[in-house]
Amino acid sequence: MFELMVARKHISSDPKMVLFTVLAVALAIGVIVVMMGINEGYKSDLVSSLVENNPHLTVSPKENEDYITLYRTLSAIIWSYPQVEAVSPRIMGKAGAKHKDIVRAVSFIGADPLKEDPLMKVQNDMIWGDYSDLVFKKRAAVLGTKLADDLELRPGQKFNLVLQNKSFNIEVIGLIKTGTGSDETLVYLPLDTAQELLSQQDVVSEIGVRLSDIYTAPSIAQDLSSRFAYKAVSWQEQNRDVLQVMDTQKVILYIFYALIFVIAGFGVANTMIMAVTRRTKEIGILMAMGATQSSIVKIFLAESLILGPPAALLGCLLAWTTAKLIEAYPVQLPSDVYQVSRLTVLLTPQTFALAVVFALGVNFLAGLYPAYKASRLDPVLAIGSE
């Protein structure tokens, strides 16, 4: 094809222009791919943190009631849903923890370890002890690591758990590290101990549910709420504000991508306009030899598009290298602020495919005006130009 041959000749005759254009587009692609990878990685880690550190579905008491009394019957009904993997009745509250002269406010969860562990995977986060030991010990607890450090507690030591006029002497039988802010206040107790502390018998605050498919939580919650008077809330509803922030962040990132797209496009367009200016006489000669305006447009568009694939390849390589560096040298994040403990770059084949489309799109759109400008040159004036 005549136009492609001329385009290749133009490119090979000006390596500096080629290098500048490829680097400009590659850098833009690299930045966009890394930003997309960070966004996807953070979203993936955040969702994992939300669903691993919270029930996928929570059933709360009826309106104007503080506790669920028929929790055993309700638990059996919940088990009838095929997606359910774990059901754990829980009673929750706040109290004061005291050791020596140190006092801290704590949030306690009372549950049967044999039911709570399948729900929250508690044992996976244990750094000392066995969560199932709570089955055999009534005055015992598993503490968040940060809380234990604040209270200067070690496994085997005891502390006082105080609520109103009650004070229980509790032994620390395990330490848990979830990597979230709950490590500063979390106390796991046996169900009957927590009920006794709250002066409540055979009731629970909520029923936590774990599902095989986390995205079925809204439909199951809606079904439970419509069939019974209890309030069922999915993890998406519980974390609606966080997920809305993620959606807003995505919009902001797309605006950022668009700005990079425009900047890279202007760089390519400027380079191609300069090429048209330098080759005015050559363009005039081609037109005098019979090249049509359509052929001139095709030549310059071909030049732009030929530079797309190497720019995309280099940009993807830059992004992949950056991702590997971040993986090798982790960037730590405050988990109490971001809900995740480290920065993750998640690069997918779709991300790289989008990078290739971006590179070709930038080069094509940036080449339109220079190509049109070249095709509109007067052959006589062009040949006579210096």
Image (cartoon, helix red, strand yellow):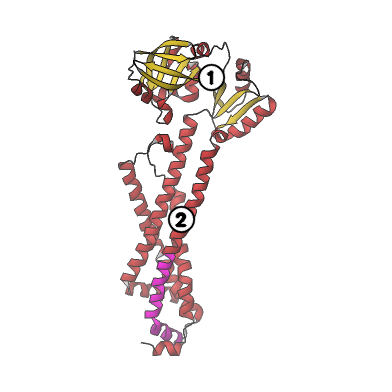
Alpha-carbon span between mark 2 and mark 1: 45 Å
- Locate residue 278: give its quadrant: bottom left
Q: In the image shown, does 45 or 95 lie closer to the viewer?
A: 95
Residue 310 x/y as whole percent: 37, 61
Residue 182 x/y as whole percent: 43, 28
Which mark is drawn over residue 292? none
Residue under label 2: 256
Magenta stretch secondary structure, dominant: helix
On-image quarter of the C terminus: bottom left
Q: In the image shown, does 136 or 15 lie closer to the viewer?
A: 136
From the viewer's perspective, tell me whether residue 73 is left or right of residue 124: right
Residue type of the residue flagged with mark 1:
Arg
Q: In the image shown, does 113 or 307 lie closer to the viewer?
A: 113
- Locate residue 236: give its quadrant: top right
Residue 232 included in the magenta stretch of the image = no
Q: Residue at x 49, y 54 (%)?
A: 254
Residue 333 visible in rendering: yes
Residue under label 1: 90
- Would you place residue 370 above or below residue 95 in this image? below
- Would you place residue 268 above or below residue 6 in this image? above
Residue 1 visible in rendering: no
Secondary structure, mark 2, is helix
